[in-house]
Image (cartoon, rainbow, N blue to C red):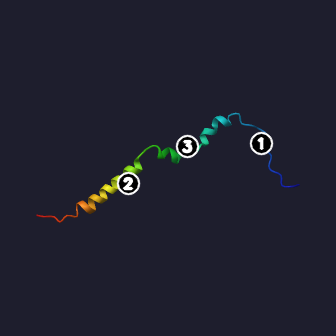
């Protein structure tokens, strides 16, 4: 007996085409979360840059009494 490929199942799922969308990568949990808050990453980086510049450069002036 040679190495024969396994035979496909004898049954065919009539709903397979209608259920295929569930396995599409667009509906993955990570993709759904990433699209929940569009622009959040850019806004976080912009805010962190603002705080860094404000704390390092703008407040570095010597205080006069």
Question: Which residue lies under the disc numbered 3?
Answer: 26
Q: Quadrant of residue 50?
A: bottom left
Alpha carbons under labels 3 and 2: distance apart: 25 Å
Q: Is residue 10 left or right of residue 50?
A: right
**At which x and y percent is residue 48?**
34, 56
Q: Is 22 drawn above or below residue 41 in the view shown? A: above
For image coordinates 74% across by 37% down, the residue present is 12
Residue 63 point in image, percent of width and height:
16, 64
Mark 3 crowdedness (10 Å alpha carbons): few <14, some 14-19, many ≥20: few
Q: Is residue 51 left or right of residue 3?
A: left
* 35 left or right, relative to 10: left
Q: Pointer 1 and pointer 3: residues touching (CB < 8 Å)? A: no
- 1 or 2: tag closer to the N-terminus: 1
Asked whether the residues under the numbered discs 1 and 2 touch, taking CB atoms below 8 Å apart as contact, a structural biologist would say no
Secondary element under disc 3, as helix, strand or loop, is helix
Q: Which mark is residue 9?
A: 1
Disc number placed over residue 45 in the picture, else none: 2
Q: Picture coordinates of residue 28 (x, y %)?
A: 55, 45
Q: Quadrant of the C terminus?
A: bottom left
Return the disc, 3 or 2, that comes first in the chain's sequence: 3
The residue furthest right is: 1
Give the CA separation, mark 1 to mark 2: 52 Å
Q: Is residue 1 left or right of residue 22?
A: right
Horizontal and vertical percent for residue 58? 23, 60
Q: Residue at x 68, y 37 (%)?
A: 16
Please name which of the two marks, 1 or 2, marks the residue nearer to the observer: 2
Q: SS at mark 2?
A: helix
């Amino acid at each position: 007996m040679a190495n024969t490929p396994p035979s496909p199942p004898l049954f065919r799922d009539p709903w397979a085409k209608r259920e295929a969308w569930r396995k599409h990568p667009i509906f993955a949990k990570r993709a759904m979360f990433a699209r929940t808050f569009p622009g959040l990453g850019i806004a976080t980086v912009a805010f962190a840059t603002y705080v860094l510049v404000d704390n390092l450069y703008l407040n570095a002036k010597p205080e006069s009494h």
